[in-house]
Image: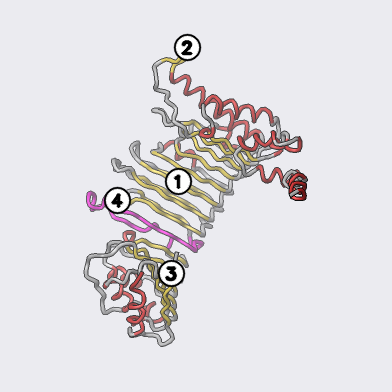
Amino acid sequence: MDSMSESQGTTEDRLSALPDEVLCHILSFLPTKFAVMTTVLSKRWKNKWTAVSNLDFMDEAFHRDVEFKRFVSWVLDFRGLSNIQKFKLECSRYYNFQRSPYIGMFTVDHRRDKYLSLIRRWIRTAIGRNVIELDLYIELFSERNDFVLPKSLFVCKTLEVLKIGPNFIISDLPQSVNFFPSLKFLDVSVHHPDNGSMQKLFPHFPLLEDLAIDGILGQKEDLKVNISAPKLKTLRIYLQVDRCDYHEHNFHIKAPNLENLDLMQDNFINFTLETPNSLVKAEVDVRGRYAKETPDHAIALPEGISNVKYLSLRDNTFEGCPLPTFNNLNHLKLCLCDCNYGRLLTESLKSFPNLEHLDIEYRSLSREELYLPEFVPFCLLSRLKTISIRGFEGHQVEMEAAKYLLKNGRLLKKMTIDTYYLHNKMEVLYKEFLMLQRGSLNCQVEFVKMK
C-alpha cells in the first residue's frame, strides 16, 4: 500500500510536459471557451491558449447572450495582432427581438442591428488578422433574418476556405474588383436566398477548386446564377424548392476542369454545365417533387456529363427521359425505388455500351409486374464483369432481375449480393442461385453482408 501511495503521489503530468507546439495543436481542436479554461490548470498552462491560431465560438455554449458577446470581444482584444488561421463563429440561438416594442431607450430593431454590427466587427477583425479559413453560421431566428456580409470579406487576400450560411444578404459591391483572390474551397448554405445576393456571391473564382451549395430555394423570385471557376475540380449541389414555390431557378456553371459532380436537385431547377471532357465522376439525383401537379415540366439530365467514367443515378432521374450515350462509362450505380425494375434496368443499360461494373441498390419494392424485354443490352453481352446488388430481399421481381443478368452476362466474373435483409432466407436463396443458368461459366455468386 505504501509503495502504491508513493507511486500515485509522484505521478508525472505527461500532458503538461509536452512541447508548446504539441499543446497548442491539442488546444486548436477545442472550442475557444474550453481552451481558455485550461489557463487555470497550472502555471505551465497559463495563457497558453493565446498561441492557438484557431478560434471557435458558439453562442449556445453560454447561458446568456451578453456573456457570449463579451467573451468573443475579450478574446479578440486579448490576442492583439496575432494571426488567425481558422475563425469559426456560430450564432444560432433564438433571440426574441420581438418581445416588446421598446427595450429601455432603444427600439427592438436598434438592439438587433447593434448585435449584427458587432458580429461584422468580429469578422472584420479576423480578416485583418490574415485569416485563412472562415466558418460563419449566422441564424438568429428573428423576424428579420438577413445578415449583411462585410465587404472586406470579398477582397480578403489570405482567405482560402469559406463556409457561410444559411441567411445572408450581400449589399452593393465595387465594380472591377478581383473578388476572392485566394479562395480554394467554398461551402454555401442558403434558405430562400434573393437573386441579387446569389449573383454577387458567385461571380468569378480564379483559384476555386471545391464548391458546395445546399439549402432551400423559393418564395422570393426566380434565381439566375452564373458561376465561372476555371480551376474547379469538385462540385456538390443539394438544392430543394420550397413546396409553395413555383419559380424557375437557373444555374449555369462554367468549369472547364471539373472532375467530380454530385448533384441533387428538384425538377424546378434548371442546371447547365460547361465542362467539355474533364468530368470523370458524376452522382445525379433529379427529383420530380411536383410531377403530378406539373406533368409538362420535364426532368432532364444536365448537359456535359456524358463523358464520365463513373455515374450514379436514381431511377426518377431518367424515368421517362431518354439518356444520352455514355461511351466512356466504366462503372454505373443505379438506385431503384418504386419503379419497374426490369424496364428501367434494361433500357438504361442500352446507353452504356462499354460498362464493366454495375452496382444496383434497391430502396423499395415495386408493385408492378417485372418487364424484361427479349432485347439484351450490348454491355451485358460483351463487357460487364461485376455486379453488386444492395438492399436485396429475395422478392420475386428482384430474383427475376438477377436471373436475367446472370443468364445474359457472358463475360460476368462475379455477382455480389447483400445479405443484410435476407435473415433466414439466405440458405434457401443460395441453393436457388446455384441452380440458375449462367451466361458465363466463370461467374461466381457471393453473398456478403454489406454496411
Q: Real-space Cα distance between discs 3 and 4?
A: 33 Å
Q: Which residue is mark 2?
A: 105
- Residue 290 is one of the magenta-drawn residues: yes
What x and y, as percent, mark residue 246?
29, 43
Q: Which residue is mark 1?
A: 226
| Picture quadrant where residue 421 is located | bottom left
Q: Type of residue at label 1? A: Asn
289 lies above or below 312: above
What x and y, as percent, mark residue 163?
53, 42
Q: Type of residue at label 2? A: Met
Dot 1 falls on a residue whose secondary structure is: strand
| Picture quadrant where residue 415 is located | bottom left
Sooner in the amino-acid sequence: mark 3 or mark 2: 2
Sooner in the amino-acid sequence: mark 4 or mark 2: 2
Dot 3 falls on a residue whose secondary structure is: loop
Q: Give the left or right position of residue 279, taking residue 73 as reference.
A: left
Q: Real-space Cα distance between discs 3 and 1?
A: 45 Å
Residue farthest toward the bottom in the current orientation of the protein: 441
Labels 3, 4: front one = 3
Q: Real-space Cα distance between discs 3 and 2?
A: 67 Å
Q: Real-space Cα distance between discs 1 and 4?
A: 25 Å
Badge number at residue 449: 3
- Residue 101 is one of the magenta-drawn residues: no
What x and y, as percent, mark residue 430?
36, 79
Magenta stretch, residue numbers: 276-305
Sooner in the amino-acid sequence: mark 3 or mark 1: 1
